[in-house]
Image: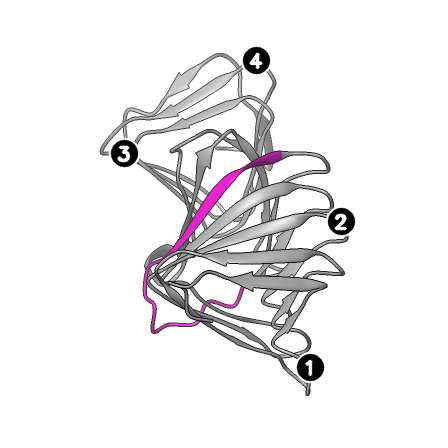
Amino acid sequence: IEQTSSTLKGNITLTNDAEIPAWATVTIPAGQTVTIPAGKTLTNNGTIENNGTLTNNGTLTTNGTFKGKLGVNQPLNIGGNEGFDVTCTYREVTFNYEKEKEQLIIGEYGESGGVLIKGRKKDHAVECGIVIAQDARIELTIEDLNIEAGEALVYERGNIEYSLVLQGTNRLTSTGGLGINLNGGYINFWGSGSLIVTGGDGAAGIQARSLYINENTFV
């Protein structure tokens, strides 16, 4: 990358590890494909805007901004070895991560799909709030995830019954509000894992219209 903004032309397959510098924005236009083969790494320290197809069979790490869709089993690492990995488990889903805002927005209005967020170090808290976009029907699974943010997990307004599947040991800690904010929605907890939720500034751990906890799940 030799300029602040580049729109890729033609289909591209990485032949070596590559890095996008902090000052650069790379756009994958509609109809174009970028492939990261097995054993190759693309590190994004700037901005990736994916309007085309990004196929990741290797490693995709973002320390900057990522906007766009990811396909099934196309993992995105956020924050390196002390961060977490995000993977679509069914259907492609839109992601919007901005490091400066310390926030990951999952889904768009009316979008549906499954997403797994897996922590790399469960004893290390990642400063990144998770937001499920308004009226996005996302079945979220978290595994060994440790989040500490102003608002750890927010489901934007929508009269939807959500599912949160727990694997391993999880902790969601808010420093300035509700631990999990459903904005009037419903939530069901499933899975064999555990979750500790803590609200900040005297706020509740979980705010929901109703919740259900499966018999094998600890919250």
Quickly name the residue at label 3. 40
Q: CA distance from mark 2 to mark 1?
A: 21 Å
Q: In the image, 64: left or right of 203?
A: left
The amino acid beneath tag 3 is: Lys
Question: Which mark is first along the chain, 4 or 2?
Answer: 4
Q: Where does residue 187 sit, x and y in percent of width and height?
A: 61, 57
Is residue 98 visible to the viewer in this orientation of the structure?
yes
Pick whichever of labels 2 and 1 is earlier in the sequence: 2
What stretch of residues is rendered in magenta?
112-128
In screen coordinates, is 16 left or right of 49?
A: left
Residue farthest to the front?
215
Q: Classify 212 as above or below 52.
A: below
| Real-space Cα separation, disc 2 to disc 4, in angstroms | 32 Å
Name the residue type under label 1. Answer: Ala
- Which is more foreground, mark 4 or mark 1? 1
Name the mark nearer the viewer: 3 or 2: 2
Separation (CA) of disc 4 from disc 1: 46 Å
Determine which residue is flagged by label 4.
31
Judging by the rendered image, the residue that carries numbered circle 2 is 158
Describe the element under mark 2 as helix, strand or loop: loop
